[in-house]
Amino acid sequence: AYLDQFVLLQADVTEQDEQDLALQRRFEVPAPPALIFWNSRGEELRPLRVMGDIGAGELADHLARVR
């Protein structure tokens, strides 16, 4: 239900080909998974980034802070 308030975009960088690595460099993501948040003006909310795996409860708590 928390995610209903967000526009979700997912990039699959599993292959780790040059295009995947370029995308990771562009967004300064050393390795997946990562959650990156932007506001309605397209500005990244950098302090709200999540790098690495997190559990459902942690994600729910984090999303509550993002709103």
Image (cartoon, rainbow, N blue to C red):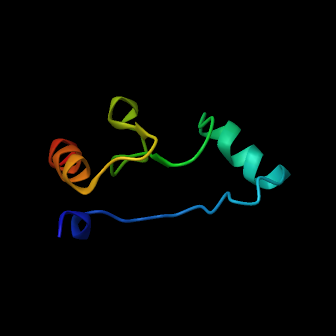
Does 52 appear above or below 13?
Answer: above
- Percent of width and height locating residue 1: 17, 70
Residue 24 falls left or right of residue 57: right
Residue 1 falls left or right of residue 30: left
The residue depicted at 34 percent of the width and 29 percent of the height is 47
Residue 56 location, quadrant: bottom left
The residue depicted at 29 percent of the width and 62 percent of the height is 6
The residue depicted at 29 percent of the width and 51 percent of the height is 55
Residue 4 falls left or right of residue 64: right
- Percent of width and height locating residue 64: 15, 48
Residue 36 location, quadrant: top left
Residue 31 location, quadrant: top right
From the viewer's side, name the closer residue of 60 and 40.
Answer: 60
From the viewer's side, name the closer residue of 44 and 4.
Answer: 4
Number of numbered discs on residues: 0
- Percent of width and height locating residue 65: 17, 41
Residue that protrudes farthest toward the right in the picture = 18
From the viewer's side, name the closer residue of 38 and 55.
Answer: 55
From the viewer's side, name the closer residue of 52 and 48.
Answer: 52
- Percent of width and height locating residue 2: 19, 63
The residue depicted at 46 percent of the width and 42 percent of the height is 52
Residue that protrudes farthest toward the top in the picture = 47
